[in-house]
Amino acid sequence: KHIIINVGRQFGSGGKRVAEALGEKLGIPVYDNELIVKAAEESGFSESLFKERDEKRRPWNVGNIFGANRYGDPCMGGLNDGEIFKMQSDVIRKIAAEGSAVFVGRASDYVLRDMECLDVFVWRRGAPG
């Protein structure tokens, strides 16, 4: 049996450090920006396109995820948020199926909602919640 941990985090909370500590303590690989590289490799699109979109930190648009925006973003080679989300989701599912992993963000708790996982959310100290 393998262990899947999804670490969601609030901006500035140190969630990535928490995920890295969990991964180190448990001997489990941690995936964050590596997901961008893997999604680019598997899709055949440029890694820079995925990184550019990730740096914009645009919230996922539900309409795009379900195909409402069929024309895509010309700056992303015609890819829309939904298509990028699907590519990253496919990579997350593939990694989770192959073995233990700690995922940082990227809606991994949603993507893996049908699997047995530990979902953790890290808040920023002093933040409402």
Image: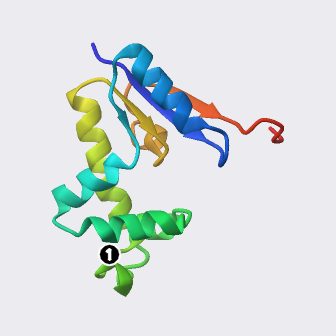
Above or below for 54 versus 1: below
Q: In the image, is 107 to the left or to the right of 10? A: left
Q: Residue at x 55, y 29 (%)?
A: 18
Q: Position of residue 105 (x, y in %)?
A: 49, 44
Q: Amino acid at mark 1?
A: Leu
Give the camera-side residue of 120 and 18.
Answer: 18
Q: Helix, strand, or loop for circle 1?
A: loop
Q: Position of residue 60 (x, y in %)?
A: 51, 62
Q: Badge 1 is on which residue?
A: 79
The quadrant of the picture occupied by the N terminus is top left
Q: Residues within 10 Å of mark 1 (few under 14, many from 20)?
A: some
Q: Is residue 35 visible?
A: yes
Above or below for 13 versus 19: below
Q: In the image, is 80 to the left or to the right of 6? A: left
Q: Residue at x 46, y 49 (%)?
A: 106
Q: In the image, is 106 to the left or to the right of 36? A: right
Q: Residue at x 30, y 23 (%)?
A: 100
